[in-house]
Amino acid sequence: MSAVDLSLRGLLLIGVLCFLAGTAFLGAIYLTWRREEQARECPWDIGDLFGEDGRDD
């Protein structure tokens, strides 16, 4: 293996790792945004359904 071949493999590895990190970052942003959207769509709390203590009496 030549030095250029090792260098290209290193760049490929760095590229794949950056892609995975970016995907995870954007996924976290999307999930946070989606959770906020669901909270806006459904403002009621579980306490509203079952009372303050959570039991269905």
Image (cartoon, rainbow, N blue to C red):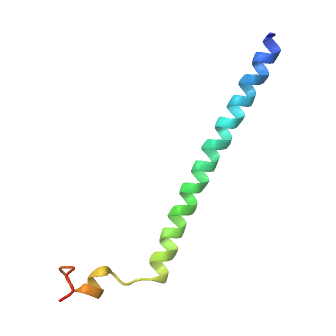
- Report whether 31 appears left or right of 53: right
Tell me what residue is drawn at x 49 percent, y 76 percent: 38
- The residue sitting at the front extreme is 57
Tell me what residue is drawn at x 71 percent, y 35 percent: 15
Q: Is residue 55 above or below residue 31?
A: below
- Report whether 21 appears left or right of 44: right
Tell me what residue is drawn at x 69 percent, y 36 percent: 16
- The residue sitting at the bottom extreme is 57
Q: Nearer the viewer, residue 13 or 37?
A: 13
- The residue sitting at the top extreme is 2
Specify the quadrant of the image occupied by residue 11. Answer: top right
Which quarter shows the C terminus?
bottom left
Q: Position of residue 33 (x, y in %)?
A: 54, 66
Q: Position of residue 24 (x, y in %)?
A: 58, 49
Q: Is residue 1 above or below residue 17?
A: above
- Report whether 13 appears left or right of 44: right
Q: Position of residue 46 (x, y in %)?
A: 31, 80
Which quarter shows the N terminus?
top right
Q: Position of residue 3 (x, y in %)?
A: 79, 11
Tell me what residue is drawn at x 52 percent, y 75 percent: 37
